[in-house]
Structures are given as structure tokens and as C-alpha cells.
Amino acid sequence: MKCKLCDTLKEKESWNKQWMDEEWSAIPEAFGKLTDLGFINGSFLYQCPNCGLLYQFCSWNESFGDGRTEFESIRKLGPEEAKKYLPEGM
Ligand SMILES: [Zn+2]
């Protein structure tokens, strides 16, 4: 069944911005609707409040020439992976 809230997110989504920029480009709208669960078992996790699907959040930055670009991404976790991060019943 498709989730009306997070079905628009692909298996993996990423977006970026230049180091000095204020605005991120192309942040998926649905990302803003996910619940931030914080840092759990070594990963930053987000959860869809509608269907309960877990997302693993990553951020990093890379240097290109004289500029630096910041990246952020989220990845959908399958049921088996989700169990590693959240104990049963959450
Ligand atoms: Zn969902």
C-alpha cells in the first residue's frame, strides 16, 4: 500500500548546497514531514508519522576546487534493517 505522505520519496534521496549558501536545493517536500527521531544506534533516523517507515539520514561535505559543497541524504530502511536500529514494538 502506498503511503500518502512519503511515497513520493525514492529509495534514496540526496540534496546539496554550496558551503556559504543559506538555502538547500531540491530538498524533497516530504522530508520536512518526517519525524526526527534523533541519533539512535549510530545513525540519525527519521520516521514517517503516517506509515512508520524508517529513514537513515547522512550528511557530509566535499571540496571541489576552491569551493566546498555540503550534502545530505536519506535512505529508506527495509524491515530487517529497521530492526537493527529500533527495538521491537516502537
Ligand atoms: Zn510513509
Image: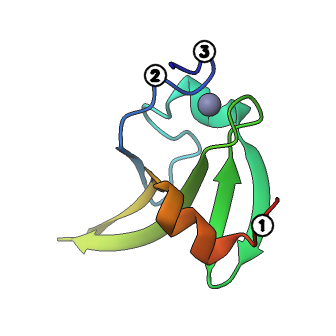
Q: Do tag 2 and tag 3 residues touch (Cβ < 8 Å)? A: no
Name which residue lies at 78% across and 66% down. Answer: 38
Question: Which residue is labeled 1 in the image?
Answer: 38
- Look at the numbered disc 2 and give the secondary structure of its residue: loop
Please tell me in which quadrant of the rendered image residue 66 appears: bottom left
Q: Amino acid at mark 2?
A: Thr
Choose between 51 and 67: the one closer to the eye: 51
Q: Is mark 3 within 8 Å of ligand 1?
A: yes
Choose between 80 and 72: the one closer to the eye: 80
Question: Which residue is labeled 3 in the image?
Answer: 4
Q: Do tag 3 and tag 1 residues touch (Cβ < 8 Å)? A: no
Q: Do tag 1 and tag 2 residues touch (Cβ < 8 Å)? A: no
Residue 29 rendering spot, x and y as whole percentages: 57, 24
Foreground label between 2 and 3:
3
Crowd class of label 1 (few under 14; some 14 to 19; many from 20; radius 10 Å):
few
Is the residue 45 above or below the residue 1 in the image?
Answer: below
Q: Measure how far apart labels 1 and 2 are at the Cα level.
A: 23 Å
Question: Which residue is labeled 2 in the image?
Answer: 8
Please tell me in which quadrant of the rendered image residue 68 appears: bottom left
Tell me: 44 left or right of 35: left
Q: Amino acid at mark 3?
A: Lys
Q: Which quadrant: the C terminus?
A: bottom right
- Look at the numbered disc 1 and give the secondary structure of its residue: strand
